[in-house]
Image (cartoon, rainbow, N blue to C red):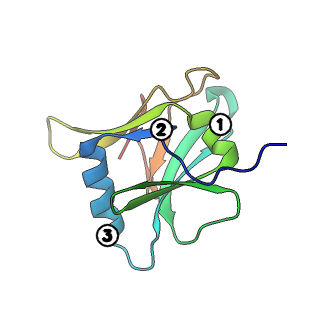
């Protein structure tokens, strides 16, 4: 049996613009260790994914440490998110959204997302 690898290196990529936005969100909160990305089953739309603030690290979390940003992903979710790139795109009407590129490419899924507790958009956008 393989040992659990608790460090993420290149399984998840975060663009510079997404890194800046995520770091800003995390730094605004008290008692937050970083960001948590998780996966959930989702009826007819397939799998869905969400982001929230991480207030603790669990035994089966893998952690991506990028500068001052820590991203926590449990070992099951990491299997579905392997190869994803998280980007942040500005909208023409102001604001922006997080976009997960290549998510669920091998297993299918809805691309629906909730970001940091608020309802996300469609088409892989979060925000």
In terms of image quadrants, where is residue 56? bottom right
> Can the viewer see residue 72?
yes
Q: Earlier in the sequence, mark 1 or mark 3?
A: 3
Q: Nearer the viewer, residue 6 or 39?
A: 6
**Residue 32 located left or right of residue 21:** right
Going from N to C along the chain, the mark reached first, 1 or 2, is 2
Say the numbered circle drawn on residue 112: none
Label 1 sits on a secondary structure element that is: helix
Task: Return the mark for residue 10.
Answer: 2
- Residue 101 % position (x, y): 42, 29
* Residue 121 visible from this viewpoint: no
Residue carrying label 3: 27
Q: Residue at x 67, y 27 (%)?
A: 44
Q: Is residue 28 above or below residue 97?
A: below
Numbered-mark total: 3
Q: Nearer the viewer, residue 6 or 112?
A: 6
- The residue at the point 61 percent across, 28 percent down is 45
Asked if the residue under mark 2 is in contact with the one under mark 1, i.e. CB atoms within 8 Å, the reply is: no
Circle 1 sits on which residue? Answer: 79
Furthest toward the right, the residue is 1
* x and y percentages locating residue 40 in the rendered image: 65, 43
Q: Position of residue 10 (x, y in %)?
A: 47, 38
Task: Categorize mark 1 by other alpha carbons within 10 Å: few (<14), some (14-19), many (20+).
Answer: few
């Amino acid at each position: 049996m393989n040992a659990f690898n608790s460090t993420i290196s290149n399984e998840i990529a975060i663009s510079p613009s997404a890194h800046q936005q995520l770091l800003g969100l995390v730094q605004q909160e008290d008692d937050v260790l970083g960001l948590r990305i998780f996966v959930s089953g989702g009826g007819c739309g397939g799998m869905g994914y969400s982001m929230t603030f991480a207030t603790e690290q669990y035994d089966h979390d893998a952690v991506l440490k990028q500068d001052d940003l820590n991203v926590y992903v449990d070992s099951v979710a990491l299997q579905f998110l392997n190869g994803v790139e998280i980007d942040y795109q500005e909208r023409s009407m102001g604001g922006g959204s997080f976009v997960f590129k290549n998510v669920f490419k091998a297993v299918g899924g809805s691309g629906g997302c909730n970001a940091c507790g608020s309802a996300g958009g469609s088409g892989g956008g979060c925000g």
